[in-house]
Image (spheres, grey):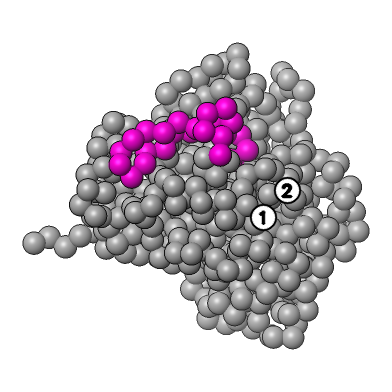
Amino acid sequence: MTAPPVWTNWAGTVSCDVAVAAPASVGELQRVVAAATERGQRVKPVGAGHSFTAIAATDGLQLDLRHLAGIVHADRASGLVTVLAGTRLHDLNEALWQLGLSMTNLGDIDVQTVSGAVSTGTHGTGARFGGIATQLRALELVLADGALLRCSAEENPEIFAAARVGLGALGVVATVTLQCEPAFALAASEAPASLDDVLADLDANVLGNDHFEFYWFPHTRRTLTKRNNRVLPRTGLRPLPPARAWLDDRFLSNTVFDGVNRLTTRRPGLIPRANAIASGALSARDFVDRSYRVFASPRTVRFREMEYAVPRDAVPHVLAEIERWLARSGELVGFPVEVRFAAADDIWLSTAYERESGYVAVHQYHRREHERYFAAVERIATDVGGRPHWGKLHGRDAASLRAAYPRFDEFVAVRDKLDPGRTFDNDYLRRVLG
């Protein structure tokens, strides 16, 4: 008998032996789910495997959605675009541009499937913009019995409120309908700055730019700032020259960065000096390009990540506490801390539910231990009411998360209604939802 294949996520933090089905249509997806439920088998869809948590792991049937990809329908006039769940964001963005459309906001990587991105609460940055799930106008769920349920603000609105960030707990997302807008370009301005200056002008930076974020290099007071702002229609593009883009984004940010982390893994004492050199070597750059090319950057260096959404005005305190803990503990961290911002929204399990949020993401090279560092940051963020990103490492459970989400029990009630037999359950969901 052939052993089942072993599935491993991108970060290498999760693996499991799985039986795999790869449906080629929504109808086939319905039949596969219904048959698995009939057998008493658990079912879990997987997209790009880019979640660091075990949210996509299963001891039953894994659904590979790679064949459920592409645009089903696009209305250029309204901007409404219906997309199959397994569509990768980088493919979707290219296709939308050809239609004269863009997504309103994106995260800083685009390898995920659209359903995985919305289900885990993936977000970008910008004080006026919510996560990707806020761009949803409708979705279709395959339930445990194979039925196809459509929901929107008008049709099954309670389910829609839960399913926009549904954690894969309610059913299998088959399609999503996104509110897009006329294609737009962004003017990107990236420059080094001191952490003190960034924090002193934080409100002006966050509110005065469409999209603002910064990277703080631990063991230094240095940052890299990124300001992305929309340009007027028909503004000419001025992308980075190919040689500069390759040098900055491929060679320095990935190849050289990986080499430095390999070295400092063997000799951790070099990390503070390496961070100082790296941050000191940063140079400013300005360019104008298609929005999705500005939002996302290539990432080839493997790492572990935890990210917390905290009240926006708590960001300086959180960073100061992280810096104090690093100094006390002697922990050495070679990855920058990424800080982003987002508008409040009304999605029940969104990390920005009813709260303007700052996002503090901490990383550690995949060859180094991350547990002590992440646990310390989690304590700091939890103390100010922080909510962990569902697709990134954290140690929270249902008891502590219930207090962080006012609509937590309502989400669980929808789950009980749609999946009483727990066809879509796994260890991760048992921990975070109870």
Q: Which residues are magenta?
A: 132-158
Q: Nearer the viewer, residue 184 or 378?
A: 378
Q: Is residue 180 visible from the viewing direction of this image?
A: yes
Q: Are marks 2 and 1 in contact (CB under 8 Å)?
A: yes
Left or right relative to 150: residue 308: right
Q: Is residue 433 located in the magenta-colored stretch of the structure?
A: no
Report the disc number at residue 354: 2
* Residue 291, image x, y percentages: 65, 33
Q: Quadrant of residue 209?
A: top right
* Residue 358, image x, y percentages: 74, 55
Q: Quadrant of the N terminus?
A: bottom left
Q: Residue at x 66, y 77 (%)?
A: 376
Q: Residue at x 62, y 52 (%)?
A: 407
Q: Nearer the viewer, residue 256 or 71?
A: 71
Left or right relative to 206: residue 38: left
- Between discs 2 and 1, the one toward the N terminus: 2
Q: Quadrant of residue 211?
A: top right
Indicate whether 33 appears above or below 2: above
The residue identified by callout 1 is 406
* Residue 171, image x, y percentages: 40, 45
Marks 2 and 1, how far apart in space?
A: 9 Å
* Residue 310, image x, y percentages: 73, 59
Crowd tier of the residue under label 1, counting other residues whose Cα lies within 10 Å: few below 14, some 14–19, many 20 or above: some
Dot 1 lies on which element?
loop
Amino acid identity at mark 1:
Pro
Amino acid identity at mark 2:
Glu
Dot 2 lies on which element?
loop
Q: Residue at x 53, y 81 (%)?
A: 266
Left or right relative to 306: residue 413: left
> Between tags 2 and 1, which lies in front?
1
Q: Nearer the viewer, residue 284 or 135?
A: 135
